[in-house]
Image (spheres, grey):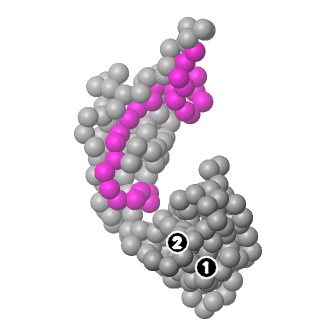
Amino acid sequence: MTKDEDKRLRLINNLDANKQDILGDFTLTSAHPFRMFDSGKIRLYDKTFKTNQSLKISRDSTNKKIILAHKWIEGTEYNLVIEKDVATDTMDNKYMKTDTIAFSAKRASDYGTIKIKIDNLDTSSHPVLMLKKDNNIYYQQRLAQKNYTIPLILPGDFEISILFDSNKNGKWDTGNYWKKIQPERVVARKETFNVRPNWENELSVDLSTLQ
């Protein structure tokens, strides 16, 4: 490895088999925080190389991730151009050459639909259904009726949990020792739930077993 290769800044994207999640952001992640970043050196084109003006570029709180927010159109082909010297990190690694990333947006058939049936629903406990994937909350729904249909869910295994949201703020709260407020209860379903693409996946949740 040459000295120049040692100082090359590498940006890792979050594409899945070269496809972009139509509900999510395109991200570029660095191993180290950025010292310099020029958003004007990132451009998004469609397959005819017409510039997409609605692209919004930002960085996350760690200053290691570039977030590209755009209304992705399913099945559309895109070209992302990242110019030389777009960024430098705190280790003085630099983006050495201009690159083009060609990718397409996922289609609706790449996703699954979940049809949820809730049994023994008691809204007085303010239950919130949470779908977790890779230890992150992927989707949540306050339960006010017995049946829900959720479209465009990425395939894979999900953990199913119920949050009993006593203060009705839509998130889990740790409580307060000094005020003698207990943490809000979260109860997980023992079995994971597998979502298959291009399929109506049926899920039944009996809240009486998760109290």
Depth-wise, is mark 2 or mark 1 nearer the camera? Answer: 2
Label 2 Cα crowd, 10 Å radius (few <14 / some 14-19 / many 20+):
few
Residue 204 location (% of width, % of height): 30, 40
Tell me where residue 195 appears, x and y as whole percent. Answer: 31, 55
Residue 157: x percent and y percent?
31, 51
Residue at image coords 58%, 27%: 168
In the picture, residue 160 is in which quadrant?
top left
For the N terminus, the image quarter is: bottom left
Amino acid type at circle 2 is: Asp
Residue 196 is situated, as x and y percent measured from the top left of the image, at 29, 60
Q: Which mark is residue 96?
A: 1
> What residue is shown with label 2?
6
Farthest-out residue, left:
191
Lateral position of residue 41 relative to residue 33, left or right: right
Instruction: Mark 2 or mark 1: name the one nearer the start of the chain.
Output: 2
On whether residue 23 falls in the magenta region, the answer is no
